[in-house]
Amino acid sequence: MRRSSMTLFSDPMCQYSHRVRIVLAEKGVTVDIEDIDPKSVTEEILEANPYGTLPTLVDRDLALYESNVVMEYLDERFPHPPLLPVYPVARAESRLWIYRIERDWCVLIDQIKASPDGKKADAARKEFRESLVTIAGIFEEMPYFMSEEFTLVDCCLAPMLWRLPELGISLPNNRHVKPLHEYMERLFERPSFQESLTDLEREIRE
């Protein structure tokens, strides 16, 4: 599979596709974004990605899938602004945070979406909400997640936090959680985030 311009095959409601769209917008990359129904993946995508998953990125002869692989490729291919720290220790820590987000939080989101009205979903909502409330204080120290600069970790968190209403989760509005609310506002007001939103994603908070 070859395309003359970079193309992202993206699920317009998926947090993983959203991550990649934020990175592309942050870098100012010229890219064709094709919204794809994940239940109707085309032969063209299957040719590029044997798993037929979204997002899938095609850059000339190169086809990439799995959102973290795609994000890191884009960060190296378009180095400005950098979205991972320069130093190896800090880079490793960022990768570990992303791994923990996926192991601890993405799993809960999957449980909520699998059966929104079930007991498992209710337990997952409670656990996710409590976990967010617990970490709220870290945003008093730095404007972004454990960092002075916007990074790939924030690119992973922003789509999740944007989807809280869709997941049936509301955060308390008190002094302890205020830093988290302010962090969310910083994320959502970034031009790259606004540019990354699909029409369907905008409806989540309209």
Image (tube, rainbow, N blue to C red):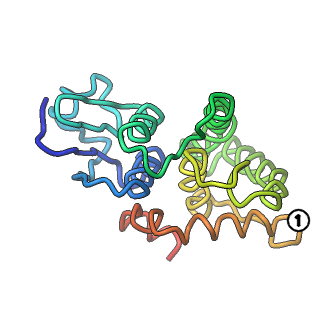
> Measured along the vertical axis of the image, is residue 170 above or below residue 129?
below
**Residue 183: x %, y % from top left:** 69, 64
Comparing 51 with 141, the one in front is: 141
Instruction: Place residue 22 in its image quadrant.
Output: bottom left
Seen from this angle, which residue lies furthest bottom? Answer: 206
Q: Where is residue 128 in the image (x, y as percent from the top left)?
A: 73, 48
Residue drawn 58% across the image and 48% down it: 151
Vertical relation: 47 (above or below) 40? above
Q: Is residue 107 visible?
A: no
Relative height, residue 166 to residue 57 (above, below): below
Residue plotted at (45% across, 71% down): 203
Residue 100 lies, in percent from the top left, at: 68, 34
Q: Position of residue 182 (x, y in %)?
A: 71, 69
The residue that mark 1 highlights is 176
Viewer-side residue, 60 vs 178:
60
Q: Residue at x 46, y 44 (%)?
A: 16
Looking at this view, name the residue that lies furthest to the top. 50
